[in-house]
Image (tube, rainbow, N blue to C red):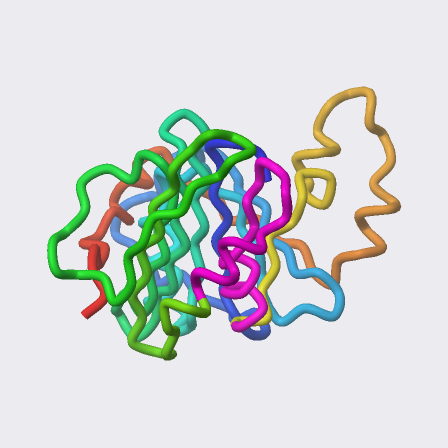
Amino acid sequence: MEPDESCAQSAGLYRIVRQSSQSEPFPSIQRAIPVWRFKGHQWTILWLSGAEEALAFALSLLLQTTVITFYDSDNANYKAFKVFGNECLLEHYLYGAECGEIPPNYWDIIFEDYDADTFWYRVHHFKSVIRSVDETELRQAAISRKWDWDDRGFLDTCLRYFEAYIPLLEETPHHYRSEDRTTFHQWDNNIARLDLILMPSNWKYLDWTIPKQVL
């Protein structure tokens, strides 16, 4: 995944949300976000920019489904994995060298590990109300991570638990948007469905109160 990108995923087959009649015209469209599902996968994938977590949570409410968000910050050097459902934040895994302000007495697990390859201390934070994870399991996954900058570690464990997948850039429509890439055949052969979410110019009305903590 590219830096400063986030990927949200909503489970199950697609559902049709009908737009009710409005007294005022729908505002102009600012942008379109591709939404797709890989063949053999149960999750639908949205490629967002991190600041649009409100949209992911709104989809969880509107479609009454589970949504996973993953945010990878390159400049602040932290990563956040969240699971929303039932109008709540159900699971939260936060790790990195600069995780910002941390709520006291909040996490089920918190520990620090040192990466000799990059000379970074990474702090891992985890809390969940939908599954039980012990510190030994998280430590072992973090220590045995792949030796690359992407630091999959316990993130892979989380994704496998939910049978979810974060695509590479080459597996997204964004890889084919430049003029020198004129064929979509390879990507088309891997997807079961592709749709677009049209974002109005005043889309920030979706910025509802997002749950900040697992309760």
**Range covered by the magenta-colored residues:** 138-161
Residue at 56 percent of width and 33 percent of height: 117
The answer to if 20 sits in the magenta stretch is: no
Q: Quadrant of residue 64?
A: bottom left
Q: In the image as oriented, which residue stretches furthest toward the left? A: 104
Give the prevailing secondary structure in the magenta stretch. Answer: helix
| Along the line of sight, the residue nearer the viewer: 49 or 213 | 213
Percent coordinates x, y for residue 108 in the rendering:
25, 67
| In this view, 174 is above or below 160 | above
* The C terminus: image quadrant: bottom left
Q: Is residue 96 left or right of residue 6?
A: left
Foreground residue among 154 and 182: 154
* Residue drawn where x is 29% and y is 40% of the image: 99
Q: What percent of the width, then of the height, locates residue 148?
A: 63, 39
Residue under the point 56% across and 74% down: 12
Image-quadrant location for residue 114: top left
Question: Is 86 on the left-hand or right-hand side of 49?
Answer: left
Residue 23 relative to residue 105: left or right: right
User: Above or below — where is 206 with respect to 101?
Assistant: below
